[in-house]
């Protein structure tokens, strides 16, 4: 597996916003083929893939801003034919040891990690336990998004969706029973877990719109959650807050757009219909006799 | 010194100019051509950057259609902007590997190119922190939006020369609720040709380029070779 990192697009640049993945998870990418796009200060940049293979992991979602040298995804070359090439991070001066580790050639797949594996940033005993329980070794990761990314990457084969849900809802993955292939945790497992957790989960969901990799809530379920504004407590046990699906978000966006760009006006006219009603009564029988229709409506007369 | 070929395409549709840019970017990536600097003027068009917020478009497509304005989502950085007659649009196709390998420095340098030209004309223009572009007294006179692929740039800047600023009412330019201005509004009388010539020279200075104008007819893209005058008349 080759790490794909956030490249440094200039000396003064310390972070970048990943705006678009140009390849989907599981999709094949050639070496040097545009893989994702980043945005810095009115400049959109396409980033080519450092190697050929299959995009196996997407660790940074679209719209997130991360420090340079952060691993944003991983490519499995086993499925491709290209030899591993230096990642774009090569251009980074990379003074930090963590960043240096990123630019080093990645270890061949299935090779046990070096003895120095335990990550320098591993502060949480919870995290350590999780690593052991999952049985995957830690790898050095860049400092900034430390806890969140690290936990995710050592938690075995998890889909980005599951990872994201776990992060956003602050779920401890080791408490969730996986029912997927090989004990994998699926979205349904998380949902079942969250239903069981009820109100507790809901409060955590405040982080939904504001969570960033730099401020992970993953392993801090004990933190007292901020009260959810405008959400009466009484409703809590059976409610839960979910992120909007892309479709729902687009619907909302377009409804608001329509509200803004077109006039929303109701006009009301008062009309005295007495005479028309009388006339209608008067000609009703004659009309039916002549045309065969039962009657003529007032609306038609108005045209 | 690196050379840069300069040309003025005159009035061209947005899509046509975009297609030409892409072709030149491809050739530049392959090292088949030198750096390019294209000037163009677009008919009324509103373009939205890849990360732009559609909410900054204030008019419905029906209103735009009636006003004769095209709408193009595009792949440059930045939010929404307007291009139209009287605006000098510049598309540098530069390989930044031969310059500084720094996309932010690139944007700052384009700002400097325009600031220098305005200074020659006695206008004190500058930057506004966090708001890329060139500003005069809190009003934006030039907008910038760039795309980079393998260090080769496309898109660029739009300098309001004699632009009818009322067209900006349809958008929140670049997502900022700040006013726009034009060189005419600032009392500059220089012609489009003079300005393009000054911009080209300023690019040469700021990017350490040697300018060359080429005979475009042979390449099939049209456009006129520039006569690079020394000063504003």
Image (cartoon, grey):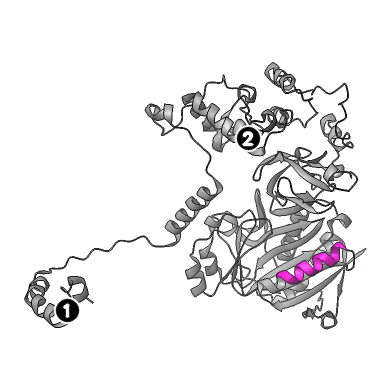
| Residue closest to the eye, A238 or B110 | A238
Residues B213 and A82: in front is A82
Q: Is residue A114 left or right of residue B63?
A: right
Q: What residue is shown at x 58% (from left), y 30% (from top)?
A: A189
Q: Quadrant of the N terminus of chain A?
A: top right
The label number, if any, that marks residue B166 in the structure image? none
Give the vertical position of A18 relative to A170 (above or below).
below
Q: Within the image, what quadrant is residue A73 found in?
A: top right
Residue bounds of the magenta highlight = B18-32
Q: What chain does badge 2 belong to?
A: A
Count the numbered circles shown.
2
A55 within the magenta span:
no
Disc 1 marks which residue? A292
Q: Residue at x 50, y 61 (%)?
A: B58
Residue drawn at x 8%, y 76% is A285
Q: Which residue is mark 2?
A: A162
Q: Quadrant of residue A187?
A: top right
């Amino acid at each position: 597996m080759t790490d794909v990192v956030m490249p440094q697009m200039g000396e003064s640049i310390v972070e970048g916003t990943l705006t678009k993945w140009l390849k989907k998870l599981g999709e094949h990418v050639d070496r040097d083929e545009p893989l994702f796009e980043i945005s810095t200060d009115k400049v959109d940049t396409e980033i080519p893939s450092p190697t050929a293979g299959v995009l196996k992991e997407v660790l940074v979602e679209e719209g997130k801003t991360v420090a340079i040298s952060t691993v944003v995804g991983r490519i499995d070359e086993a499925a491709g034919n290209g030899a591993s090439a230096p990642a774009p991070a090569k251009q980074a001066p990379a003074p930090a040891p963590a960043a240096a580790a990123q630019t080093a050639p990645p270890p061949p797949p299935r090779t046990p990690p070096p003895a120095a594996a335990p990550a320098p940033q591993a502060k949480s005993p919870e995290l350590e336990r999780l690593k052991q329980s999952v049985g995957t070794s830690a790898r050095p990761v860049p400092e900034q998004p430390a806890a969140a990314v690290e936990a995710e990457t050592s938690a075995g084969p998890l889909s980005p969706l599951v990872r994201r849900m776990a992060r956003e809802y602050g779920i401890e993955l080791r408490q969730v029973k996986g029912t997927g292939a090989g004990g994998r945790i699926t979205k349904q497992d998380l949902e079942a877990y969250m239903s069981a957790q009820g109100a507790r989960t809901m409060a955590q969901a405040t982080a939904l719109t504001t969570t960033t990799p730099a401020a992970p809530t993953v392993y801090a379920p004990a933190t007292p959650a901020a009260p959810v504004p405008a959400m009466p407590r009484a409703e809590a046990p059976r409610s839960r807050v979910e992120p909007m699906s892309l479709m729902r978000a687009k619907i909302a966006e377009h409804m608001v757009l329509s509200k803004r760009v077109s006039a929303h006006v109701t006009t009301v006219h008062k009309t005295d219909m007495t005479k028309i009603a009388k006339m209608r009564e008067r000609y009703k029988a004659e009309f039916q006799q002549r045309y065969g229709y039962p009657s003529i409506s007032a609306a038609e007369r108005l045209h | 010194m690196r050379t840069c070929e300069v040309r003025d395409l005159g009035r061209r549709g947005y899509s046509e100019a975009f297609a030409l840019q892409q072709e030149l970017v491809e050739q530049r990536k392959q090292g088949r051509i030198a750096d390019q600097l294209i000037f163009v003027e677009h008919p009324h068009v509103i373009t939205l950057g890849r990360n732009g917020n559609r909410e900054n478009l204030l008019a419905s497509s029906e209103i735009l259609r009636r006003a004769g304005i095209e709408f193009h989502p595009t792949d440059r950085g930045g939010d929404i902007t307007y291009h139209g007659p009287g605006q000098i649009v510049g598309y540098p196709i530069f390989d930044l590997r031969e310059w500084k390998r720094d996309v932010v420095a690139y944007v700052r340098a384009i700002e400097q190119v325009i600031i220098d030209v305005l200074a020659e004309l006695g206008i004190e223009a500058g930057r506004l922190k966090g708001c890329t572009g060139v500003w005069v007294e809190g009003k934006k006179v030039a907008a910038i939006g760039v795309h980079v692929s393998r260090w080769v740039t496309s898109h660029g800047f739009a300098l309001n020369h004699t632009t009818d600023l009322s067209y900006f009412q349809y958008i929140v330019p670049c997502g900022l609720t700040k006013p726009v201005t034009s060189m005419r509004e600032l009392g500059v009388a220089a012609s489009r040709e003079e300005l393009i010539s000054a911009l080209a020279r300023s690019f040469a200075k700021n990017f350490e380029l040697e300018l060359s104008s080429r005979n475009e007819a042979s390449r099939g893209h049209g456009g006129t070779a520039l006569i690079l005058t020394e000063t504003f008349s």
